[in-house]
Image (spheres, grey):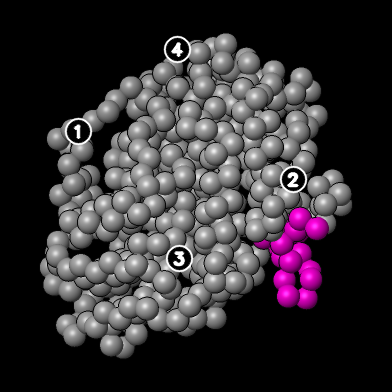
């Protein structure tokens, strides 16, 4: 990334700094001033936590935007209005790195973030709406998802108002070989047809920029892989039991391949695509990587047209604006509160866990005027779930605040009362009022996320 382009001196003392994570899962929020920047110690998790170019940067900082909280409700914000940018905290103040243009403002917190979002919307574009309630397979069926279980879901949610039924990771032969595996013996068109026949929009998960090292794509097209300066493929993820590589999205053949892939998936009948691990398209070491990422995802948008709902996940945030309909704004929720071994001991708050999913998502609500924000799913089940009732309620409240309602609970895991609760969730659109940074009134009820967020480690 290019050198310093904006300096914003801060003379007052300030209690906290707003750190904005590089991609969907990367920790975001107000961190106490004076704590050192920590990076995860497990290399395979590094790309989930921060910009790989920034792993050796010991300054406190974040992607695209930073802010300090000067007095009471007053903040000072510095943000890039282009796809590329980094804000770091130095002794004299905030420093913006990248070509900008840079936006600066001081004032009431919500107003300043709203003004920044407005500028981003003008420059990068805006797409907002609401997808309607989503049933997503991941947090219930995981990679055991198959055709019979999806048929059982469709039957079991018969009387529930889900607009979208989305198959997550587990249907593909491998990342790169985007064909149905043996768990979907009739192919993906058949399950899309079945879904559509029940009146729901068929949704599908893909990680279009990933290539498993054992995939046919990797052996047939090694030239399409993103490589380091020594020529070795860059390991972008390790979530499938071995090294997973990335496509080099700067290549014309890769862009053609991406356009053909999503065209095929839409032809199968899917109209809601959750595109995941998108940070893999911004792992090159040159300055233009956010711009390369952005033009690659634009190829996808152009191929599917405006009618297909595109949800970005694991995605660089600001570079995704204007292209996607929605973006995941935090790490994965989980049927547990906090994985302390990972969050505290490995300094990695980008992994699955409900506490950080809530904390990071709350730090990104300001994006709502330019893109739909996905806080991930809510849980209603007690089966295979360690969350307490109040913890589950926080996820429900967060979903209402985001106006993005999803769950993964297989209907046959729910007792009568849990199912009724889910139904109430899906059918309600309560009035939301934001009182303070972490305090809301939801249909007349006070909801305070302060205790959750303030207890997280930095
Ligand atoms: C499918 C999942 C789901 C989920 C995505 C993404 O760091 N990690 O250990 C890690 C685990 C899971 C993960 C991301 C990171 O989840 O967010 O909704 O689609 O992929 O594999």
In contact (CB < 8 Å): disc 1 and disc 2: no
Q: Position of residue 241 (x, y in %)?
A: 75, 53
Predominant SS of the magenta segment = loop
Q: Residue furthest right?
A: 219
- The residue at 18%/46% (across/down) is 434
**Is disc 2 placed on a helix, strand or loop?**
loop
3 or 4: mark nearer the eye: 3
Q: Which quadrant, please, contains the C terminus? A: bottom left
Tell me the crowding category of disc 2: few under 14, some 14 to 19, or many 20 or more residues within 10 angstroms, Cα based.
many
Residue 443 versus residue 264: which sits nearer the camera?
Answer: 264
Q: Nearer the viewer, residue 19 or 86?
A: 86
Alpha carbon distance from label 2 to label 4:
36 Å
Q: Which mark is residue 159?
A: 4
Residue at left offset 29%, top offset 40%: 401
**Element marked by disc 3:** loop
- Mark 3 and mark 2 lie on one chain; the one further toward the N terminus is 3
Q: Label 3 crowding class (10 Å Cα cut-off): few <14, some 14-19, many 20+?
A: many
**Furthest residue toward front:** 252
**Which residue matches tag 3?**
84
Q: Which mark is residue 176?
A: 2
């Amino acid at each position: 990334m290019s050198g310093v382009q904006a300096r914003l001196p801060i003379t007052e003392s300030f209690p906290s700094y707003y750190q904005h994570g590089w991609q969907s899962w990367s920790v975001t929020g107000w961190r106490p001033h004076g704590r050192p920047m920590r990076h995860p110690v497990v290399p395979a998790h590094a790309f989930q936590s921060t910009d790989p170019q920034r792993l050796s940067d010991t300054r406190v900082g974040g992607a695209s935007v930073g802010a300090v909280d000067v007095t009471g409700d007053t903040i000072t914000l510095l943000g890039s209005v282009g796809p590329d940018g980094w804000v770091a905290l130095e002794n004299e103040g905030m420093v913006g790195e990248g070509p900008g243009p840079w936006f600066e403002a001081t004032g009431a917190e919500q107003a300043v973030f709203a003004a920044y979002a407005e500028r981003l919307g003008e420059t990068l574009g805006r797409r907002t709406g609401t997808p309607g309630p989503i049933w997503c397979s991941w947090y219930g069926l995981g990679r055991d998802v198959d055709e019979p279980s999806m048929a059982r879901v469709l039957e079991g949610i018969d009387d529930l108002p889900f607009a979208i039924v989305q198959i997550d990771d587990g249907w593909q032969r491998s990342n790169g070989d985007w064909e149905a595996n043996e768990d979907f013996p009739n192919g993906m068109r058949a399950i899309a047809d079945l879904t559509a026949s029940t009146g729901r929009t068929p949704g599908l998960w893909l990680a279009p920029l990933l290539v498993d090292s054992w995939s046919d794509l990797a052996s047939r097209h090694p030239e399409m892989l993103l490589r380091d300066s020594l020529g070795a493929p860059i390991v972008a993820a390790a979530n499938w039991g071995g090294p997973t590589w990335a496509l080099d999205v700067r290549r014309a053949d890769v862009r053609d391949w991406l356009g053909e892939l999503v065209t095929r998936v839409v032809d199968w009948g899917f109209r809601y695509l959750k595109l995941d691990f998108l940070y893999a398209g911004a792992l090159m070491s040159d300055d233009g990587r956010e711009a390369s990422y952005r033009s690659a995802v634009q190829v996808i948008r152009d191929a599917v047209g405006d009618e297909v709902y595109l949800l970005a996940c694991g995605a660089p945030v600001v570079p995704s604006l204007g292209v996607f309909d929605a973006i995941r704004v935090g790490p994965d929720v989980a049927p547990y509160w906090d994985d302390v071994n990972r969050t505290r001991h490995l300094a990695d708050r980008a992994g699955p866990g409900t506490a950080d999913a809530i904390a990071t998502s709350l730090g990104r609500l300001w994006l709502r005027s330019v893109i739909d924000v996905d806080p991930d799913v809510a849980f209603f089940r007690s089966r295979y779930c360690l969350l307490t009732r109040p913890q589950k309620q926080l996820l429900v409240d967060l979903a209402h605040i985001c106006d993005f309602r999803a769950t993964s609970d297989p209907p046959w895991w729910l007792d009568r009362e849990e199912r009724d609760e889910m139904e109430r969730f899906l059918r309600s659109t309560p009035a939301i009022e934001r009182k303070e940074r972490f305090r809301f009134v939801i249909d007349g009820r006070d909801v305070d996320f302060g205790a959750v967020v303030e207890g997280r480690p930095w």
